[in-house]
């Protein structure tokens, strides 16, 4: 065999196998090969095995110096495009103000909507580039980015155009999602807005291929199940995948809706109940948990341990956003899932690679297998578990995308 590049000096080559989502105890089935090597041709993996078993020729050799290699991480849930900040809200909250008082004073998500709507597309691209770079440096080679801070169809389209521009300027693979975030303040406008979303916004997004999925925030203070049903039905009609933010603060039936509609993922779960865990475990919908929110807002963590014990397929994301999760490291999201959600190191890596890929509908990412694009991380240490053990410094030494070191 002839390779363009042979990567050697790998203390441990770690990956899950098979493109399907790993449910329950299968989330602990990681394959760890010691003293391994990877051969790459045309940006793709053509061989992996024990270094001593390689008997081909390679045009170039890179020795990573006895370090662990894991697949590039997949961040399946971010809101990386926004303008302004939420520092005044943070100050108010840490000084004891309630969420309602902050909202009444003009803070909260509406502050971000105002600032984002007022920014130009170029300004938004510049602001978001830095965040995408931070996620990339933390190991995320594939990143989902949502719209959702626009408040009209035109502003949501503009946000998706910003994500398109970001995707063109980064080596990371960006997956754009249209997020239907919060309803108009005036309840009389809700029905009209839903109609506009279903008859104008979603068809245009699908026609221009500006998003691969539609997400909706189903919560007591946001959209109701009946409204979300219309939006998700419209998404399906236009061949877009579906996702939901739900059961974050209250049990509102969004989880049941997601399972019923065959959503790719249902995200959050902090307020989910035992019977909901069983329903999710029996479905193909991925449970995406977001520990950065629990840490930042001090709300109960999603029941990651119980979800896995019930047989669900769990993914983990940063939920990077200015209000509830200013977490700029995908590796740290996995480290937090171990501490706050009760995942083991093995489960966290599966949640941040193959299961996160499934939460985005991707069968060709999150693993180190022959035929796949060579997206991988060289860690600082020789034991891969340092990826989820380390806090406060970056455990990722090198990020490789399509067989090239960044
Ligand atoms: Zn979110």
Image: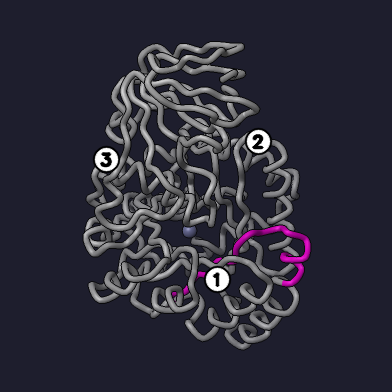
Distance between mark 1 and mark 2 Cα atoms: 29 Å
| Residue indicated by mark 3 | 345
Up/down of 246 relative to 158, above or below: below
For mark 2, what is the residue? Answer: 170
Depth check: 362 or 198 in front? 362
Q: Earlier in the sequence, mark 1 or mark 3?
A: 1
Please name the residue shown 45% across and 73% down the image. 258
Q: Does the magenta portion include 211?
A: yes
Q: Which of the two discs, 3 and 2, labels the residue nearer the N terminus? A: 2
Please rate how many residues cluster around mark 2, counting C-alpha atoms within 10 Å: few if below 14, some from 14 to 19, many from 20. Answer: some
Image point (53%, 79%), residue name:
228
Residue 54 as seen in the image, left or right of residue 372: left
The x, y position of residue 250, in whole percent, is: 34, 74
Point 75% across, 75% down: residue = 200
Cβ(mark 2) to ligand 1 < 8 Å?
Answer: no
Residue 399 covered by magenta stretch: no
């Amino acid at each position: 065999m002839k390779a363009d590049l042979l990567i050697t000096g790998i203390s441990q080559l770690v990956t899950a196998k098979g493109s399907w989502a790993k449910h329950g105890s299968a989330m602990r089935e990681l394959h760890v090969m010691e003293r391994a090597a990877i051969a790459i041709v045309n940006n793709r993996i053509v061989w992996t095995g024990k270094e001593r078993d390689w008997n081909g020729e390679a045009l170039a050799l890179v020795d990573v110096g006895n370090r662990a290699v894991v697949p590039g991480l997949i961040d399946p849930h971010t809101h990386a495009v926004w303008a302004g900040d939420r520092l005044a809200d943070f100050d108010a909250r840490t000084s004891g103000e309630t969420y309602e008082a902050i909202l009444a004073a003009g803070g909260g998500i509406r502050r971000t909507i105002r600032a984002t709507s007022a920014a130009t597309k170029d300004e938004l691209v510049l602001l978001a580039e830095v965040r995408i770079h931070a996620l990339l440096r933390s190991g995320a080679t594939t990143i989902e980015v949502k719209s959702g801070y626009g408040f009209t169809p035109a502003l949501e389209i503009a946000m998706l155009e910003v994500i398109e521009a970001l995707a063109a300027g980064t080596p990371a693979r960006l997956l754009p999602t249209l997020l239907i975030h919060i309803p108009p303040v005036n309840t009389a406008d809700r029905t009209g807005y839903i109609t506009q979303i279903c008859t104008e916004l979603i068809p245009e997004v699908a026609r221009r291929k500006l998003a691969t999925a539609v997400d909706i925030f189903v919560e007591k203070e946001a959209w109701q199940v009946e409204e979300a049903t219309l939006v998700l039905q419209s998404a399906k009609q236009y061949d877009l995948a579906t996702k939901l933010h739900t059961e974050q603060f209250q049990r509102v039936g969004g989880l049941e809706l997601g399972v019923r509609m065959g959503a790719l993922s249902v995200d959050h779960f902090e307020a989910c109940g035992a019977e909901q865990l069983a329903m999710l475990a029996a479905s193909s919908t991925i449970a995406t948990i977001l520990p950065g929110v629990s840490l930042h807002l001090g709300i109960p963590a999603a029941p990651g341990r119980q979800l896995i014990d019930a047989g669900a397929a769990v993914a983990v994301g940063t939920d990077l956003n200015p209000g509830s999760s200013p977490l700029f490291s995908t590796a740290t999201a996995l480290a937090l899932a171990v501490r706050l959600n009760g995942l083991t190191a093995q489960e966290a890596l599966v949640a941040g690679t193959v299961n996160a890929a499934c939460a985005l509908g991707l069968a060709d990412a999150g693993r180190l297998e022959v035929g796949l694009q060579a997206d991988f991380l060289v860690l600082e240490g020789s034991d891969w578990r340092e990826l989820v053990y380390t806090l406060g410094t970056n455990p990722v030494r090198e990020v490789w995308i399509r067989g090239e070191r960044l």
